């Protein structure tokens, strides 16, 4: 089930001018909401891409490591390590 959240954002000065230049007849977006949704989608995609790149890098290091350095890990070990790395 989807829900809609209304948020209020205050912008002034250069940020407000920049948004105004990107909205309406002169801009690429019909309204501010459309512009903000697009920015959020792009940021979400960037964040997901960065997470995927980190995973690829970690897997690359793991596959490149000498086999004698391997050690068994349980799912709980992996979860604990990831929580420690993320600061959670």
Image (cartoon, rainbow, N blue to C red):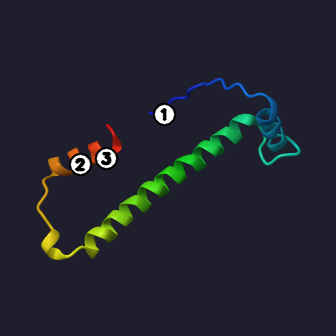
Q: Which-is-in-front pick, marks 3 and 1? A: 3
Horizontal and vertical percent position of residue 61 = 31, 69
Q: Quadrant of the N terminus?
A: top left
Q: Quadrant of the C terminus?
A: top left
Horizontal and vertical percent position of residue 18 = 80, 40
Do the residues bearing badges 1 and 2 touch, measured as CB atoms within 8 Å? no
Q: Which mark is residue 2?
A: 1
Q: Which residue is mark 2?
A: 81
**Seen in the image, is 29 located left or right of residue 83?**
right
Q: CA distance from mark 1 to mark 2?
A: 33 Å
Q: Which-is-in-front pick, marks 1 and 2? A: 2
Mark 2: few, some, or many residues within 10 Å (few <14, many ≥20)? few
**Seen in the image, is 77 located left or right of residue 53?**
left
Above or below, comparing residue 6 to residue 20 in the picture: above
Horizontal and vertical percent position of residue 35 = 71, 41
Name the residue rendered at 27%, 43% in the picture: 84
Q: CA distance from mark 3 to mark 1?
A: 32 Å
Front-most of 37 and 15? Answer: 15
Name the residue rendered at 76%, 35% in the picture: 15
Find numbered disc 1 in the image and state the secondary structure of the residue it sits on.
loop
Q: Which residue is mark 3?
A: 85
Do the residues bearing badges 3 and 1 touch, measured as CB atoms within 8 Å? no
Front-most of 11 and 28? Answer: 11
**Seen in the image, is 35 located left or right of residue 5?**
right
Q: CA distance from mark 2 to mark 3?
A: 6 Å
């Amino acid at each position: 089930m989807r829900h809609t959240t209304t948020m209020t954002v205050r912008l002034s000065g250069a940020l407000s001018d920049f948004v105004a230049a990107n909205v309406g007849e002169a801009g690429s977006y019909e309204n501010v909401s459309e512009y903000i949704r697009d920015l959020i989608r792009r940021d979400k995609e960037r964040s997901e891409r960065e997470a995927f790149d980190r995973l690829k890098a970690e897997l690359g290091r793991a596959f490149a490591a000498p086999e004698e350095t391997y050690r068994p890990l349980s799912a709980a070990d992996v979860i604990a390590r990831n929580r420690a790395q993320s600061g959670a």
